[in-house]
């Protein structure tokens, strides 16, 4: 087990959360990109990715209460661009990409923090394997939307943890990979992503709905972003494919409020990145790792947005 710790200030002088970014302890394993991130029980779990060029099965765990990183049990295989979400206190990996050739795999695993190891579940149906997708829980089931399988896909699959079984869901209106999203106000949102070129679409799926609904477009079209829910907003950070930056990376941070169907611009990332998972918990958005150059350029940087 490894551990890294440093004290960080997360609130303003008056004791109320401020709209600002703060630096946090870097990833314990060092530069890592193309990860997934999930928040469970107030901690942030960073899964897999490229670590200093090698694909790893690592599970890196950040505890905001102590400012410390720790290690969870390794994934059953080394993967990158994993798709992950949680049901209750259990984390699920629902497909990923493997090998340097970005081969799509349908491996499905679950782990409840405190258990000794991951459990192998029923894989995604043959022909539907993919990574770089968006996933979230709707009514106790996990919806996996879009993703990459040699190209962007419209596929939507629904995993039932109680039955350990997969069924098909309503396809996305357009192919999307490297999008991001989350469940907010009982609906799953898929923001941006790409189908060759970056997209600005925002799609919404309500439980039991037969089709996705298009909502207000993301102000900045981009893929490779990190997403998380803070309060009543979906926050989209970073991304790649920026023609106006030598790095090709976006610093933009934008927040969507479902009730108003409206986006607003937040403070930009101090360290523009793409290829990172992000997770919201405790009223803050945690953005560990990623890359500061389009393509490969992993860093261990960890920053927290405190709106």
Image: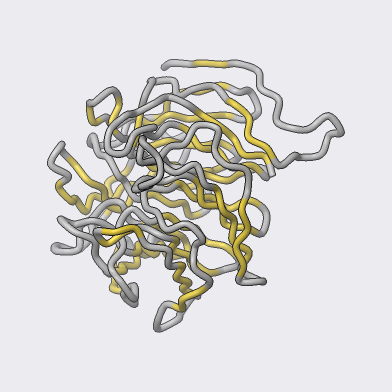
- What residue is at 81 percent from the left and 39 percent from the top? 16
Q: How many marks?
A: 0
Q: Is 203 situated above or below 250? A: below
Is residue 12 left or right of 156 when viewed as pictured?
Answer: right
Q: Specify the farthest residue to the right.
A: 14
Which residue is at the front of the view, 252 or 38? 252
Is residue 283 left or right of 292 when viewed as pictured?
Answer: right
- What residue is at 25 percent from the left and 37 percent from the top? 76
Is residue 128 left or right of 257 when viewed as pictured?
Answer: left
Whole-percent x and y of residue 299?
39, 26
Q: Is 203 situated above or below 281? A: below
Q: Is 12 situated above or below 228? A: above
The scheme the figure's colours follow is secondary structure
Which residue is at the front of the view, 220 or 183? 220
Whole-percent x and y of residue 184?
57, 63
Q: Is 193 situated above or below 202? A: above
Whole-percent x and y of residue 9?
71, 25
Whole-percent x and y of residue 275?
36, 41
Which residue is at the front of the view, 19 or 246? 246
- What residue is at 34 percent from the left and 48 percent from the top? 241
Which image quarter holds the N terminus?
A: top left
Which image quarter holds the C terminus?
A: top right
């Amino acid at each position: 087990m490894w551990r890294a710790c440093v004290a960080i200030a997360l609130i303003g002088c008056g004791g109320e959360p401020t709209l600002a970014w703060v630096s946090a302890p870097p990833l314990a394993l060092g530069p890592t990109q193309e990860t997934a991130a999930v928040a469970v029980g107030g901690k942030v779990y960073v899964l897999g990715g490229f670590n200093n060029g090698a694909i790893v099965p690592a599970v890196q765990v950040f505890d905001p209460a102590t400012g410390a990183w720790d290690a969870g049990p390794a994934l059953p295989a080394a993967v990158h661009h994993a798709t992950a979400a949680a049901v209750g206190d259990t984390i699920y990996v629902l497909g990923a990409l493997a090998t340097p050739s970005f081969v799509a795999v349908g491996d499905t695993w679950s782990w409840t923090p405190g258990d000794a190891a991951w459990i192998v579940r029923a894989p995604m149906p043959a022909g539907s394997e993919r990574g770089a997708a968006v996933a979230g829980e709707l009514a106790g089931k996990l919806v996996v939307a879009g993703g990459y399988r040699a190209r962007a896909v419209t596929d939507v699959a629904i995993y039932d943890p109680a039955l350990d079984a997969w069924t098909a869901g309503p396809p996305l209106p357009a192919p999307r990979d490297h999008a991001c999203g989350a469940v907010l106000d009982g609906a799953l949102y898929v923001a941006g992503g790409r189908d060759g070129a970056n997209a600005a679409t925002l799609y919404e799926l309500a439980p039991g709905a037969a089709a996705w609904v298009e909502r207000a477009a993301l102000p900045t079209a981009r893929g490779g972003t990190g997403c998380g829910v803070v309060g009543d907003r979906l926050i989209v950070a970073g991304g790649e494919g920026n023609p106006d930056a030598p790095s090709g990376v976006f610093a933009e941070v934008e927040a969507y409020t479902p009730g108003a169907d409206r986006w607003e611009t937040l403070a930009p990332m101090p360290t523009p990145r793409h290829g990172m998972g992000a997770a919201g918990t405790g009223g803050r958005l945690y953005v560990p790792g990623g890359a500061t150059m389009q393509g490969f350029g992993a860093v261990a940087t960890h920053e927290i947005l405190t709106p």
